[in-house]
């Protein structure tokens, strides 16, 4: 509680949710056409934070679809969406999870978090996990510790497909801004109303139920402990 | 907490020191710096960055290893590398786990129980070195150095020069086995037969069309990261079309515009038919025609274009698309269309790897593919299939070497392979068992697991376990793999993150890149770089190598190599890790370089009339020019080393320089060497005998690599094995239904050499009739993360051990049921061929 | 299938919290309605039992909840205090404060009933009455908020329904009533007034019956609305309509916790209700009904907590 940012975020919760005057707005565009499912990002993220086995801040889903010989496989890299209306923040009873005024990144103060796991349920994307060492919840934070030093997030840095484009959308000349300007993008599960700041180009939209209806084979899986899409 | 710190404002322009982008994405101008720096998320402190090089796979990308509190915590790509452009694959980053593997071997270990029993005692280096050197000296003194067999796997660059060239050379043994025949040796032989050198380089940055036969460059490949990220850039940013021929939908096939699900080994028919289309439709005209000048297509040393074209038409006439359809299951229509596309989208890049060559008929598949590239003018051109370019390091060499002696056990039984230019390592143990060519007294293996990586695992175990066949066995290893478990002595090497090397892998931009590997932390425990150990053994035997450690060797090499010396030598390399000449131009069309008369008018250089080749009779170890003329270039042993140039018309060109075989300086579509061995000199159809005899219920098993594992060596990397620890067999729904198999069932897969039990993954992403199993899983040693079994010298210092959620789920190894059978021409192990029966249990 | 992050401790907490709050509310309202306990000794007795019961399950439940905290699991005993260093609009934050107040108030309220000579109009009467006034809203709050807690998230379509809070409230009241009945059954009334006892028992049973009827209705609404929706909610409800939790839900909760108890209660309540006959539920029956209702209440929490976690949003 020595932290002024957290104080602000606690008291000004509602204000933060509708704040639109951040100095920076970090966002990511993921161009799935360029993603080859190599998992370099997954391992970059895992090792950057020594994420414990069984948990992940980021992963890549694989969507295999079609009937032989017309079969395709696409990939969907996943990370915290740094939502504009983060439901994880609105349910947090301690204010440990908050959206940063300065750049919109949703962060967690691990000293305040009590590990009640409420936010884990509230996140419609399954992006949060309980860190077994700290007893606090953890998730992707856009690699703030790197970004604050001007270095690209670990996953972006390593992405060999250049599928992950990161930057400040307040800056119209940034690559993200341009990508957003010139491409049709979508966000994940828009119906959840969280207004993600991670945007996708050409994201696959299939789920398993689609297979039942059409008789087309679909397999959606991840390499995480939870093999299914969450 | 970091999130408390105020954001540091950075000027967008200065931060963009990245060379990483040359696509149309303007990302390079973006605020964040790409790589080169990392910070601790816990403390915010900058992590120590050590420029070094990966060795998890053969690609050996330059990297940066980050250290925090004396531990290796993170690995990233080297942003200044022109090869990787700062990118790094999952496996390379998973390399962080090697150093901290709780099952790592930290001390020399000597067997105490029976061989293979798993009883070990820690001994000192002095004891270990005395023991090995003592035995080595006995053999050397007895004049039988060949009874020391050295068997290596991923030993490249400086370590190879230290150990193979210097140490083994000075010791005098040539009983040296490698692993190339289980790798891509077959492709190399075929390339040596055609264009002389082995590695090829695919110029995706400039290509307009990519046709891929049995390679999986987006997941694997010997130049993986440097080519993969360029390929995806070509496919997306430039919308280059790619067609992939594979028996299953690899991720590369999935990212290609078209997947041609070929019958295993049917690639040859497909390639021949594509040549047929090109020739019969005169699509060779233009670029192909131009290139034919540099090709040998007939028996005649220098033939006319008409004759060459006629010879090609004649040879390929029989291989119509309709004919091929019967052998490869790709429709004649598709064959024609793709062949036309390939021939008319110049430059086009023809890609091939193990899926095409690890077959009975792999040699001619690769020759046919080389031909296809040649007749469309896509050889060594921008955007095509190029001759590999790598740096030329100079290094210290022992002056006086004895004439080496060898046991003839590395090329397989007599007649097993006609031209095994990369040996038949998978038959070494068989040969030892057989004994007719002698047996080594000392078997030392390095970075290689004969037990696990070859076919017929049981036989490998039986031989390695048998003290009457192999009296003394030394394994050099950071980890307790299946081969180490069968050794008498294990010499612990630190993983590559704690070693020195200079490196030299192929550059996809046709500009050589020099780079080094340096230890990010001192070797843990008592581990020692084997390069240094070799020096210490030499010293004990009484051999003076002229250097004492790997570090010294690397330093001396930096001083000897002019390009490096000029920029500051060893110190420069330690600081920067990589170097390339910023003024260098990409190297294409090297064969077109005209030699100056002074090059071939030397006293010792003569012209071989039969081939049009200039060669140096002295270098070829002939007594006189006459003796050389008499024997002729082709039939003089090792004459390729004396190659000077190729006469074409009234000019002498650098031509296609031979590497291991006495081919001419032409690109040899017509191979006199093949003819000499009794094969058709032109690419020819061979069907696979076992496939011809297949029963109705038989299937063909193929094996493959995944993006997150390397062979048998990365399963101790917890971050990788968490992602991929189980390797269910891919079975098409049609085959599954016939056998009553459903997703997740345990199935039995049986071949002539054994059977395995494996989980089924029912997927349309594999061709009916094919069962595809990756070869990464099914360890029974290699520590807890890999197999669930603790190494006898394992420790408990990794809290993640108790979080390993895949315990008991370690997959099944297919090599138990793959026979160690070779391609009869080049000796390549036929990994993609095995006929099996698959049944539900 | 998604992983379970909230396990038995949370289920126990939701169940006991509801039961305690229910008992407290019933106690306080019976007490207040019977002219602050003056009217009948039977009513006072009910109020007394309810008051004595209320704090205990809530405290035990909160205790269980602490075990589910990640911070507690890593040995940090007191980080949960952070809950009370802030107040915000999170249902959990509001709930924690409610719970804390409820525990304090219910303890004071229980205190006023302690001692064998506590009776209407004794020296604690004033305090008791004030506390009773507090107990009603706090109890209702606690019982409701457990449902709001779960219902507040679109990410958990099974939970994401305003009806859930109603369901939890009614279930809390009904288990609260059952727990009072059970206690009285086991330990007997302290009253010598047989008519009063019968009246109060009748009162409780008929209340319970009414509550269960409401519960059946609310369950029906819950299922119907979920089923009639499209998308994630419809998908999620499948888990009780033909999925892994179907039998537990229908047998464990609906049949055991609702249908059987209501049938039994009908059998004994109807004669008095319709024909003004004596209300005479046999002791064993009474015990059985109470147990069934309590088990049913637990099953409800169990099924709901698990079902909410094994289902999730669909699509990407
Ligand atoms: N991730 C990863 N990368 C690696 C390695 C690794 O272990 N893991 N190892 C490195 C080494 S040493 C090597 S040699 C290279 C090898 O690199 P590649 O040769 O590209 O890889 P493989 O998986 O051996 O084989 C390539 C493809 O051949 C397909 N295939 C199998 N049978 C047939 C067939 O009959 N016809 C056709 N057309 N295709 C077939 C397989 O499905 C597979 O997708 O990779 C290097 N890079
Ligand atoms: N079925 C099937 N089998 C295959 C293949 C296939 O596609 N299918 N691919 C084949 C191919 S392409 C290849 S190249 C071979 C590779 O076969 P190998 O050369 O045997 O495989 P590696 O994974 O390189 O590792 C060999 C051993 O090196 C040890 N090792 C790891 N790091 C170090 C180190 O730093 N120092 C030392 N001294 N030892 C180390 C490990 O213990 C490991 O067991 O496998 C082949 N086997
Ligand atoms: S687990 Fe931590 S961050 Fe999440 S809601 Fe609870 S206190 Fe907030
Ligand atoms: S993705 Fe989930 S965790 Fe991330 S901000 Fe959105 S709701 Fe919160
Ligand atoms: S931004 Fe950082 S924390 Fe987030 S997924 Fe990428 S590497 Fe992981
Ligand atoms: S690193 Fe890039 S290309 Fe690879 S899986 Fe991640 S997002 Fe996709
Ligand atoms: S491609 Fe090979 S050498 Fe390069 S980073 Fe990956 S594993 Fe390392
Ligand atoms: Mo290989």
Image: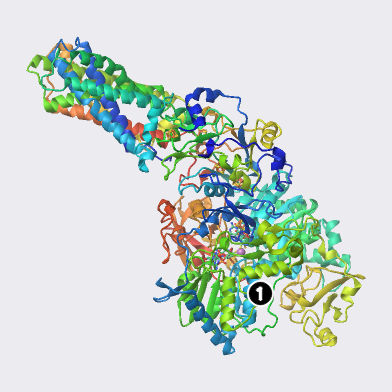
Mark 1 Cα-neighbour bin, 10 Å: few <14, some 14–19, many ≥20: many
Q: Residue at x 45, y 30 (%)?
A: A95
User: x, y percentage for residue B617?
Assistant: 81, 82
Looking at the image, is B433 positioned above or below residue B33?
A: below
Q: State the residue in front, C170 or A156.
A: A156
Looking at the image, is B595 positioned above or below residue C10?
A: below
In the orientation shown, which residue stands out farthest toward the left?
C192
Q: Is residue B828 visible?
A: no
Residue under label 1: B420
A87 relative position to B359: left or right: left
Q: State the residue in front, C107 or A202.
A: C107
* The image quarter in which residue B397 lies: bottom right
Q: Secondary structure at mark 1?
A: loop
C55 relative position to C218: left or right: left
Q: Residue at x 59, y 38 (%)?
A: A204
Q: Is residue A104 visible?
A: yes
């Amino acid at each position: 509680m020595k932290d002024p940012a957290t104080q602000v975020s606690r008291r000004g919760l509602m204000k933060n949710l509708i704040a639109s005057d951040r100095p920076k707005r970090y966002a990511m565009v993921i161009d799935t056409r360029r993603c080859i499912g190599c998992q370099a990002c997954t391992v970059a993220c895992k090792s950057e934070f020594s994420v414990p086995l069984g948990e992940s801040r980021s992963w890549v889903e694989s969507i295999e679809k079609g009937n032989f010989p017309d079969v395709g496989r696409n990939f969907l890299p996943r990370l915290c969406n740094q939502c504009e209306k983060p439901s994880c923040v609105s349910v947090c009873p301690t204010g440990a999870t908050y959206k940063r005024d300065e750049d919109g990144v949703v962060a967690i103060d691990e000293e305040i978090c009590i590990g009640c796991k409420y936010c884990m349920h509230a996140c419609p994307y399954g992006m949060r996990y309980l860190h077994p060492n700290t007893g606090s919840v953890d998730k992707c934070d856009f690699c703030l510790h790197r970004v604050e030093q001007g270095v690209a997030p670990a996953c972006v840095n390593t992405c060999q497909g250049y599928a992950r484009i990161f930057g400040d959308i307040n800056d119209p000349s940034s690559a993200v801004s341009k990508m957003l300007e010139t491409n049709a993008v979508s966000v994940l599960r828009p119906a959840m109303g969280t207004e993600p700041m991670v945007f996708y180009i050409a994201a696959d939209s299939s789920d398993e139920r689609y297979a039942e209806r059409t008789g087309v084979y679909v397999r959606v899986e991840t390499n995480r402990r939870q093999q299914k899409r969450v | 907490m970091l999130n408390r710190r105020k954001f540091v404002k950075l000027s967008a322009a200065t931060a963009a020191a990245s060379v990483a982008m040359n696509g149309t994405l303007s990302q390079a101008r973006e605020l964040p710096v790409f790589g080169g720096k990392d910070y601790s998320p816990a403390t915010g402190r900058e992590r120590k960055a050590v420029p070094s090089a990966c060795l998890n796979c053969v690609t050996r990308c330059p990297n940066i290893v980050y250290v925090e509190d004396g531990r290796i915590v993170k690995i990233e790509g080297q942003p200044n590398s022109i090869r990787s452009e700062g990118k790094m694959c999952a496996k390379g980053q998973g390399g962080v786990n090697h150093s901290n593997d709780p099952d790592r071997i930290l001390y020399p270990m000597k067997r105490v129980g029976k061989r293979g029993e798993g009883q070990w005692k820690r001994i000192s280096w002095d004891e270990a070195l005395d023991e090995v050197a003592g035995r080595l000296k006995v053999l050397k003194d007895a004049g039988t150095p060949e009874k020391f067999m050295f068997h290596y796997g991923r030993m490249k660059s400086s370590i190879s020069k230290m150990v193979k060239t210097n140490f083994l050379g000075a010791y005098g043994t040539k009983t040296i086995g490698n692993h190339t025949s289980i790798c891509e040796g077959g492709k190399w032989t075929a390339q040596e037969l055609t264009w002389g050198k082995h590695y090829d380089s695919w110029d995706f940055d400039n290509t307009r069309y990519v046709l891929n036969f049995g390679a999986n460059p987006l997941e694997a490949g010997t130049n993986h990261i440097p080519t993969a990220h360029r390929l995806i850039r070509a496919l997306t940013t430039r919308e280059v079309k790619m067609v992939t021929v594979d028996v299953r939908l690899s991720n590369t096939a999935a990212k290609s515009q078209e997947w041609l699900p070929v019958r295993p080994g049917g690639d040859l028919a497909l390639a021949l038919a594509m040549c047929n289309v090109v020739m019969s439709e005169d699509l060779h005209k233009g670029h192909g025609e131009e290139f034919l000048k540099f090709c040998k297509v007939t028996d005649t040393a220098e033939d006319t274009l008409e004759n060459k074209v006629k010879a090609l038409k004649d040879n390929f006439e029989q291989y119509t698309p309709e004919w091929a359809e019967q052998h490869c299951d790709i429709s004649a229509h598709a064959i024609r269309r793709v062949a036309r596309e390939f021939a008319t989208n110049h430059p086009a890049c023809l890609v091939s790897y193990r899926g095409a060559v690890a077959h009975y008929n792999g040699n001619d598949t690769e020759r046919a593919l080389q031909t296809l590239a040649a007749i469309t003018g896509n050889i060594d051109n921008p955007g095509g299939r190029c001759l590999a370019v790598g740096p030329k390091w100079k290094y210290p060499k022992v002056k006086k070497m004895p004439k080496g002696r060898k046991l003839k056990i590395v090329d397989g039984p007599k007649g097993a392979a006609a031209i095994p230019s990369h040996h038949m390592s998978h038959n070494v143990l068989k040969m030892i068992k057989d004994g007719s060519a002698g047996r080594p007294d000392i078997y030392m293996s390095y970075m290689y697991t004969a037990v696990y990586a070859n076919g017929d695992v049981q036989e490998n175990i039986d031989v390695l376990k048998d003290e009457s066949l192999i009296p003394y066995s030394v394994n050099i290893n950071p980890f307790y793999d299946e081969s180490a478990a069968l050794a008498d002595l294990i010499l612990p090497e630190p993983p590559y993150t704690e070693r020195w090397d200079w490196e030299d892998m192929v550059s996809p931009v046709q500009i050589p890149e020099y780079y080094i590997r340096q230890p990010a932390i001192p070797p843990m425990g008592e581990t020692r770089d084997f390069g240094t150990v070799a020096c210490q053994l030499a010293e004990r035997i009484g051999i003076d190598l002229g250097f004492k450690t790997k570090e010294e060797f690397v330093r001396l090499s930096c001083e000897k190599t002019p390009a490096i010396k000029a920029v500051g030598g060893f110190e420069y390399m330690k600081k920067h890790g990589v170097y390339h000449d910023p003024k260098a131009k990409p190297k294409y069309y090297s064969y077109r370089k005209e030699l100056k008369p002074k090059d071939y008018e030397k006293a010792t250089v003569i012209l071989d009339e039969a081939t049009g080749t200039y060669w140096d009779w002295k270098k070829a170890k002939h007594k006189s020019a006459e003796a050389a003329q008499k024997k002729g270039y082709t039939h003089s042993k090792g004459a390729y080393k004396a190659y000077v140039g190729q006469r074409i018309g009234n000019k002498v060109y650098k031509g296609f320089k031979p590497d291991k075989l006495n081919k001419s300086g032409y690109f040899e579509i017509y191979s006199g060497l093949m003819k000499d061995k009794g094969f058709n000199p032109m690419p020819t159809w061979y069907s696979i005998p076992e496939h011809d005899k297949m029963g109705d219920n038989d299937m063909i098993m193929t094996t493959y690599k995944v993006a997150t594992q390397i062979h048998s060596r990365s399963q101790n990397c917890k971050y990788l094995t968490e992602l991929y620890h189980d390797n269910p067999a891919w079975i098409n729904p049609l085959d599954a239904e016939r056998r009553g198999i459903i997703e997740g069932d345990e199935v039995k897969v049986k071949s002539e050499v054994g059977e395995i039990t494996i989980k089924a993954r029912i997927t349309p992403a594999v061709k009916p009739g094919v069962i595809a199993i990756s070869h990464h899983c099914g360890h029974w040693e290699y520590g807890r993360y890999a197999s669930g079994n603790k190494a006898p010298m394992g420790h408990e210092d990794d809290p993640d051990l108790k979080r390993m959620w895949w315990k008991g789920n370690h997959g099944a190894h297919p090599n138990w049921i793959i026979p160690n059978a070779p391609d009869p021409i080049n000796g390549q192990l036929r990994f993609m061929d095995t006929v099996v029966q698959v049944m539900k249990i | 299938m998604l992983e379970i992050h909230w396990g038995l401790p949370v289920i126990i907490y939701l169940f006991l919290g509801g039961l305690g709050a229910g008992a407290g509310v019933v106690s306080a309202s019976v007490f207040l309605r019977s002219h602050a306990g003056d009217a009948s000794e039977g009513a006072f007795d009910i109020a007394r039992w309810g008051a004595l019961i209320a704090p205990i399950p809530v405290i035990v439940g909160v205790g269980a909840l602490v075990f589910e905290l990640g911070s507690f699991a890593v040995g940090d005993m007191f980080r949960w205090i952070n809950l009370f260093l802030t107040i915000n609009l999170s249902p959990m934050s509001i709930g924690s404060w409610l719970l804390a107040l409820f525990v304090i108030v219910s303890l004071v309220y229980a205190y006023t009933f302690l001692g064998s000579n506590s009776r209407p109009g004794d020296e604690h009467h004033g305090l008791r009455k004030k506390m009773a006034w507090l107990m009603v809203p706090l109890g209702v709050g606690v019982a409701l908020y457990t449902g709001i807690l779960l219902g507040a998230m679109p990410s958990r379509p099974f939970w994401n329904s305003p009806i859930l809070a109603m369901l939890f409230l009614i279930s809390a009241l009904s288990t609260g009533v059952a727990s009072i009945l059970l206690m009285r059954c086991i330990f007997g009334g302290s009253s010598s007034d047989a008519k009063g006892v019968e009246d109060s028992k009748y009162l409780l049973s008929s209340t319970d019956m009414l509550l269960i009827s409401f519960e059946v209705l609310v369950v029906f609404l819950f299922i119907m609305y979920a089923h009639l929706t499209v998308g994630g909610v419809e998908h999620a409800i499948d888990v009780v309509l033909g999925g892994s939790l179907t039998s537990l839900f229908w047998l464990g909760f609906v049949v055991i916790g609702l249908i059987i108890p209501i049938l039994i209660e009908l059998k004994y309540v109807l004669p008095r209700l319709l024909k003004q006959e004596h209300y005479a539920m046999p002791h064993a029956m009474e015990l059985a009904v109470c147990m069934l209702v309590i088990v049913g209440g637990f099953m409800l929490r169990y099924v709901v907590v698990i079902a909410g976690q094994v289902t999730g949003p669909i699509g990407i």
